[in-house]
Image (cartoon, rainbow, N blue to C red):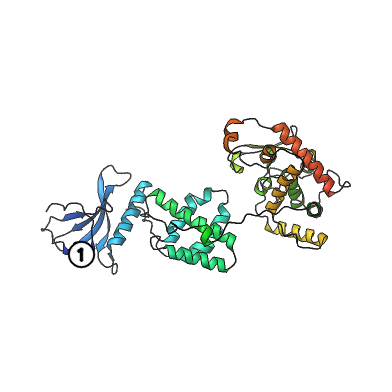
Amino acid sequence: MADLPRRELKDQFIRSLKLAPKGRPYAAPDIVVPQLKLIVSHTGRKTFKVWAIWPPAKNPAFRTIGDFGDGTGGTVTLKGARTEARAMLGQRADGLDPKRHKARGDTFGELMDEHIALHVSQTRRAKQAEREIRADLMARWKDRSVHDITRADVVLLIDQMKARGVERQVHNVYGHLRAFYNWLIERGTYGVTASPCDRLRPKRLIGAKKFRDRVLSDDEIGAVWRAADHMAYPWGTYFQLLLLTGARRGEVGGMRWSEIDLGAMLWRVPPDRFKQGVTHTVPLSEDAMALLRSLPRFDGSDYVFSSSAGRAPLKTYSKAAAKLRALVAAELGTDPNFVVHDLRRTVRTGLAACGVRDEVAELIVGHARQGLQRVYDQYGYRKEMAAGLERWARRLRSIVGADRGKVVPLRR
């Protein structure tokens, strides 16, 4: 018996199909998932299969999904067959044959794990993003199908997180969820064609995103420097170098000796450690050079700052930052309420207060050039950056107190 014309398969139609002649099964192809076919035998068995060329073969073949039924006792519903067919075709797109590799499911947890491995892990804040995803999304929807998450589910998530008083985190989690569904749709191999985040307005649901604008006062800057004086290597000089350069915490924490040209007084942050993906050159002031010269060197290690005798660079900062805040609080008699990134914002503000031009100050802290300046202005501003950082170092010296020397005694 010849195969039937391609059409949108429906449960009632499938149940109405007649038995095939003995030894001559026929197929009812689906128009929704074109490679999906329902094979009808002479015994009345109706089996979902996928017809395609599977790597590394060159000829097409069937891959069986299961018999049509209500989804119990080893049978597969029409919806389930389409989902499984799309998963198999997704494996084919990845160069895999489902006969040899277990097909991925459609649960939120399985596909989010794949999203984390293929996409999130490549982003700048991968670890923080993964923690937020697992705590607020995976814990809630891990075993649910990605096709079953609705707009109402997302709104409920937002409302419950807002009730916990974590509005800033709500924006992050909502952003992770929206990015996840956009990724599923863009890849086109998961059967997802719409996002539960569509038509939602986060500003209305969550509120305007609040950006942190904390800048330390001169008294607080001086207290931070003196507190760092009382912290042993690597943390004391680490925090002081943050204040002298305005660099990001991870850039200084992962600093290598091979990146520093002591003779030219330059620090070249390589593309793989810089946000913009290019080499970022930071002129080093005399005070920054004095700090670097005071540091220990570990045999066989290139790391400037290490809490493991040179085996690894600095990676976690929370405990050291808490100790720094405690020391500052003890001096000032009040909770300073700052985070490590606030030091960077303080340096940028201080550069402006020193009269450093905006375009030079932005280059010092490693911000990307904007608009036409990014295209047409290819001047490096190296001399201007060096002069700006020396000017800031002098201001920092005056804030901390004229009695401080350029070299901080190193405590082991």
Q: Residue at x 84, y 45 (%)?
A: 398
Q: Identity of the amino acid at label 1? A: Gln
Residue extending farthest right? 403
Residue located 18% across and 54% down the image: 27
Can residue 258 be seen from the camera position used here? no
Residue found at the very far front of the displayed protein: 204
Q: Specify whether 24 is left or right of 245.
A: left
Question: How many numbered marks appear?
Answer: 1
Q: Is residue 180 left or right of residue 75?
A: right
- Secondary structure at badge 1 equals helix
Towards the viewer: 144 or 166? 166
Q: Relative to 14, does residue 255 appear above or below in the rendering?
A: above
Q: Residues within 10 Å of mark 1 (few under 14, many from 20)?
A: few
Q: Residue at x 40, y 51 (%)?
A: 185
Residue 165 lies left or right of residue 43; in this view the side is: right
Residue 173 as seen in the image, left or right of residue 146: right
- Displayed quadrant of residue 300: top right
Residue 210 lies in what quarter of the image? bottom right
Residue drawn at x 54%, y 61% as measured from the top left: 206
247 or 271: which is nearer to us?
Answer: 247
Q: Nearer the viewer, residue 309 or 157?
A: 157
In x, y percent, where is residue 268?
Answer: 67, 37
- Looking at the image, can residue 279 be seen? yes
**120 vs 224, nearest the viewer:** 224
**In the rendered view of the protein, which quadrant contains the N terminus?**
bottom left
Give the answer, above or below, for where 369 lies relative to 220.
Answer: above
**What residue is pinned by disc 1?**
12
Rendering coords of residue 401 (x, y %): 86, 48
Is 108 located above or below residue 302 in the figure?
below
